[in-house]
Amino acid sequence: RGVGERDANRLVIRPLAKMARLVQNLSHNPLEKLEQAEGGELETDFVERALQKFGQMLQIAFGEAGSEIIGKSLGADGDLNPMMAGRKMTAVFGFSIVRNFADCTECLQEDVMVFVNTIAAIVHRAVKDTGGAPNKNIGEAFLMAWRITEPPPTP
């Protein structure tokens, strides 16, 4: 192999193949835990980290139920089937609101996003650690779900 071929393989082909695997894995399992990419300074490193961040944001935005539906609705060719039937899911839902949020945002002003992201990280970690799935977060409000794997007995 020549130097140009080695460089092309190391700098372009392998990183692009890794990114393609990431996208393919997410299409098969939208909730797959994404490993953090090592920090590199090449353009392909930035693109890979952006893809991972985008995947994580989609996981949060869709939630557990949405990710499952989207994953099953995507065909092998990547086309979305919007007519695919859904399914019932039994779960316990939790809803929480950060008290005095308006006062905090007024006091923190431009630092409010650090505050919100810190609270969101704590809530998400606590919910995941207890077997739940954070579902939605809008400002001060959080919706969480804990799936019940066995359906309740019929009366």
Image: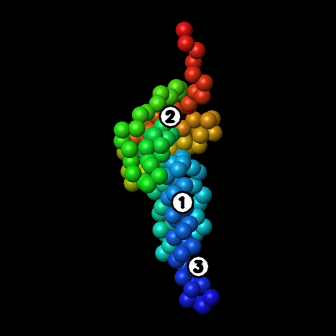
Q: Position of residue 28 (x, y in %)?
A: 53, 50
Of 145 and 68, nearer the camera is: 68
Query: Quick one: SS at disc 3?
Result: helix
Task: Please indicate, yes or no, whether residue 26 appears anywhere in the rendered image.
Answer: yes
Q: Residues within 10 Å of mark 2 (few under 14, many from 20)?
A: many
Of 102 and 130, nearer the camera is: 130
Q: Position of residue 21 (x, y in %)?
A: 55, 61
Query: Quick one: SS at disc 1?
Result: helix
- Reading the image, the residue beneath label 1 is 22
* Gap between marks 2 and 1 measured at Cα: 27 Å
- Reading the image, the residue beneath label 3 is 10
The amino acid sitting under disc 2 is Met
Q: What colour scheme governs how the chains and residues are painted in the rendered image of this protein?
A: rainbow
* Gap between marks 1 and 3 measured at Cα: 18 Å
Q: Is residue 135 above or below residue 114?
A: above
Farthest residue to the bottom: give it.
Answer: 2
- Point 55% across, 12% down: residue: 154
Q: Position of residue 129 (x, y in %)?
A: 63, 39
The amino acid sitting under disc 3 is Arg
For the residues labelled 2 and 3, say whether their Cβ atoms are less than 8 Å apart.
Answer: no
- Point 46% across, 30% down: residue: 87
Of 154 and 140, nearer the camera is: 154
Q: Residues within 10 Å of mark 3 (few under 14, many from 20)?
A: few
The N terminus: image quadrant: bottom right
Query: Quick one: SS at disc 2?
Result: strand
* Gap between marks 2 and 3 measured at Cα: 43 Å
Task: Please indicate, yes or no, whether residue 63 appears anywhere in the rendered image.
Answer: no
- Reading the image, the residue beneath label 2 is 144
Q: Is residue 40 above or below residue 27?
A: below
